[in-house]
Every structure is written in C-alpha cells, then in structure tokens.
Image (cartoon, rainbow, N blue to C red):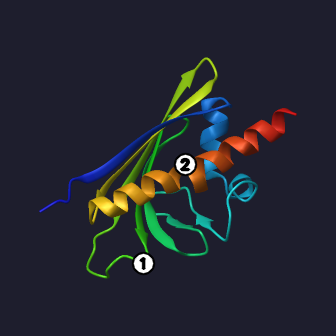
Amino acid sequence: MTNKVSTQIKYIVYAAPDEVYAALTNPSLIAQWIEGAFVFELKEKGTVEFFDGWVKGEVENFIPSKELSYTWKPNTWDKKSKPSLVTITFTKVAAGTEVEITHSDFPNADEATKHQEGWITYFLDPLNDYFIARMK
C-alpha cells in the first residue's frame, strides 16, 4: 500500500529556470547557499544527501531546467519507513522561476507539515537569498 500523504509548495525564485536548476544540481553552486555538508550526483540513481547527512536519497529523474526528482529519507524516520519522493518543476514567470515542489509518500501527516515549513526555511528562502545577493 502506497502512502498518500504529500505536500505541495509553489515559490517564486528571482532567477531564470536554467539558473535555478543549476543551483539545485551543481555541487559548486549548492555549496554557496545550503547549510551543512551535502552530496549531489546528477545522474540516474546518483546519491543525494543534505544537511550533514540528515536526509539521504537518490536521483530518480532529471530534465534540465524543467524537472528534477529524487527520493528523500531523513535519518530520524523509522527504519521501516520507505523513502518519500521529491519532484521539483521549473516554470518561467515574469519575476523569474516558479519552483513547484511536490513531496509525496510521507510516513504521516505530521512529517508532511514539518517538511512544508522546512522546504521554505531551509531550502527555498536560502536559494532565493543566494540569487538576490547576486543581483546587488
């Protein structure tokens, strides 16, 4: 049985889709905006680790500047919990890029709520701050 608990976030980043995609997939760019150690291998089944290894997963799919998806499992989840799935799409808008994150297959609704806030606080806000700082 598949867990259907999910969350969806739409967020405007002040940069073009190709720049946002690169900042989410190129390790030298990721290092400029994310907190903690990370690993990101942009290849099928490539390793994904964020926040000093708190979350681990692997790349599922990528279409440059259009879509990116990877599995996601924090080390605080029960060992029996299956990884969740993160799908990020990039749509050009007047202000830059609408980044839509669909994070599905959470073990419970509480985790979905926590991640909804976490995506904004620890991922999207710092990413956007990175681009805003580059404009100055």
Q: Which mark is residue 20?
A: none
Q: Amino acid at mark 1?
A: Thr
- Residue 23 appears left or right of 70: right
Residue 77 falls left or right of residue 18: left
Q: Position of residue 42 (x, y in %)?
A: 55, 56
Can see residue 70? no
Which residue is at 67% across, 50% downward?
126
Q: Is residue 87 left or right of residue 1?
A: right
Residue of label 2: 120
The quadrant holding residue 73 is bottom left
Position of residue 94 relative to residue 41, above or below, is above
Q: How many marks?
A: 2
Which residue is drawn at the image coordinates 20% and 59% (left, top)? 3
Identify residue type, mark 2.
Answer: Ile
Residue at 52% x, 74% y is: 54
| Residue ranking furthest to the right | 136
What residue is disc 1 on?
Answer: 76
Q: Residues within 10 Å of mark 2 (few under 14, many from 20)?
A: some
